[in-house]
Image (cartoon, helix red, strand yellow):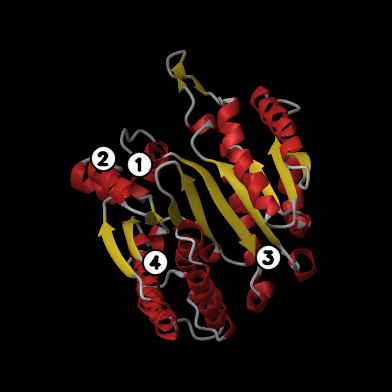
Amino acid sequence: MNLHIALLAGDGIGPEVTDQAVKVVNAVAKKFNHSITWTPALTGASAIDEVGEPYPDSTHEICMAADAVLFGAIGHPRYDNDPKATVRPEQGLLKMRQKLGLFANVRPTFTFPSLIDNSPLKRERIEGTDLVILRELTGGIYFGERGRKDDGNTAFDTCKYTRAEIQRLAKLGFEMALGRSKKLCCVDKANVLESSRLWRETVQAMEKDYPEVTVSYEFVDAVAMRLVQWPSSYDVIITENLFGDILTDEASVISGSMGLMPSSSIGVHTSLFEPIHGSYPQAAGKDIANPLATVLSAAMMFEDGFGLKDEAALIREVVNKSLAEGVVTEDLAGKNKAYKTSEVGDWLATHI
């Protein structure tokens, strides 16, 4: 198969971790006789430095022409520390999601047998955890009307959803639940928010089309609590943009490290695959960042983006092997030897 992948390394540790994923993807391609064409493109702070905007038209054209996008991270301290900056790296992320139609962020959360005691949660609470959170990505408060009034002393952000936006995400959730444990949880704040009431009403109306799926409805604050109490009780969770942003980061620590969890963003035009962690600027250039989340995102790309399950399974197999044998970066090494980011990538590619 001939595969064309747009490579958006981004900022901070993004280039380092995506380099390792490229090694792994190329090794898989060689083993399974695929041809990979990589097309790098600018995004984030690096794009602002180069061309003055975080998601330039040239990058969008490259993404539109690709079969999938492999993405690193966006963000830089000089923008984080300047709330008055008019152009910010994160604007590029929102623009990319909107222009590519990346409406569904798919965030799996699972545990690794060899690392289960690395989690801040007790073993008995997290054993058996295997859930997926689907976060709506192009609507809600991040894209609503916002502004200041009263001489800048009052600020407002508007959360708005259409029934069609909710149906589009919920359909993915129902279909995903059918292939898993047939449980779906719709997370909202319907006791307070009108937009949440539309979410609940819309999903309830879709239940009849998926009679095999058991659907529950829970308030976001209750789910935030239960995710750290009994995460294994969940299978597929669907929710709006802001709630999903918070809950997915909470769920990410269950595995023991944010450097382990992959994600995908399903789009109208193409799909994007990325680690869940940020740009971690403190580690940039030091060759110490954990590349496994990016490598596992590449596995999701093979399976969900290209329909190549054997290739994805092989990547997950060697990642589990590296964890079991202690070929890990400093965030997971403890008192044992810590491998460099590049060394982990080399090890994985060699074992593939």
Which mark, residue 62?
A: none
- CB atoms of marks 2 and 3 within 8 Å: no
Q: Nearer the viewer, residue 291 or 204?
A: 204
Q: CA distance from mark 2 to mark 3?
A: 39 Å
- CB atoms of marks 2 and 1 within 8 Å: yes
- CB atoms of marks 4 and 3 within 8 Å: no
Q: Give the residue at mark 4.
A: 17
At label 2, counting other C-alpha atoms closer than 10 Å, the crowd grade (few under 14, some 14-19, many 20 or more) is many
Element type where label 4 sits in the image: helix
At label 1, counting other C-alpha atoms closer than 10 Å, the crowd grade (few under 14, some 14-19, many 20 or more) is many
Is 172 located above or below residue 163 in the figure? below
Q: CA distance from mark 1 to mark 4?
A: 20 Å
Judged left or right of residue 124, residue 311 is left
Counting residues from the start of the chain, the first of labels 2 and 4 encountered is 4
Which mark, residue 53?
A: 2
What amino acid is found at the position of numbered circle 1 in the picture? Gly
Q: Give the residue at mark 3.
A: 120
Q: Give the residue at mark 1.
A: 92
**Image quadrant where residue 289 sits:** bottom left
Give how far across and how far down residue 102 sits, in percent: 46, 42
Judged left or right of residue 130, residue 328 is left
Is residue 33 something that shows in the picture?
Answer: yes
Please identify the quadrant where the N terminus is shown: bottom left
Element type where label 1 sits in the image: helix
Q: CA distance from mark 2 to mark 4?
A: 23 Å
What amino acid is found at the position of numbered circle 4 in the picture? Val
What amino acid is found at the position of numbered circle 3 in the picture? Pro
Is residue 43 something that shows in the picture?
Answer: no
